[in-house]
Image (cartoon, rainbow, N blue to C red):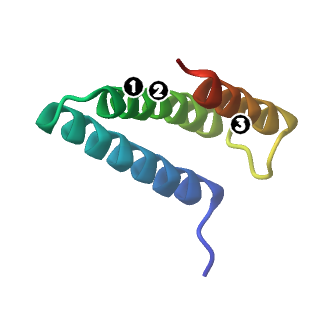
Amino acid sequence: MFPSTNDKVLLFHAFVCSVGWIMSAQFHARETKTSEKMDYLGALAIVYSNTFSLFIAKFRAQKQPDWVGAFCMLLLSRLFNAK
């Protein structure tokens, strides 16, 4: 009926990785300053998504623990403060 927590995390991870690869392919097709920043942003999002998926799989969180919100805030702060 409803996907489990691990299925949702897997779908989120697949989406993030797909978008990251698209950003990387776009950068390598046309090397501009904007596409370079998009490439680094996509790579950083993939690293964070890998780490997040590892924690979810390792601890098998059935509901959202407190550290997930802190992790998401860290990700957002890194993404918006990237130079």
Between discs 3 and 2, the one toward the N terminus: 2
Screen quadrant of the N terminus: bottom right
Residue 54 is situated, as x and y percent measured from the top left of the image, at: 55, 31
Q: Is residue 35 above or below residue 15?
A: above
Other residues around mark 2 within 10 Å, as few (<14) / some (14–19) / many (≥20): some
> Which residue bears the numbered disc 3?
72
Q: Amino acid at mark 1?
A: Tyr
Q: Position of residue 12 (x, y in %)?
A: 51, 53
Q: Give the image quarter of residue 80.
A: top right
Kind of element beneath mark 3: helix
Residue tagged by mark 1? Answer: 40
Q: Amino acid at mark 3?
A: Cys
Q: CA distance from mark 1 to mark 2?
A: 6 Å
Q: In what element is the residue under mark 2? A: helix
Which SS class for mark 1?
helix
**Front of the two marks 1 and 2:** 1
Q: Which quadrant of the structure image shows residue 77?
A: top right
Q: As rendered, which of 76 and 49 lies closer to the eye? A: 76
Sequence order check, earlier mark of 3 and 1: 1
What separation in Å lies between label 3 and label 1 (alpha carbons)? 18 Å
Q: Which residue is mark 2?
A: 44
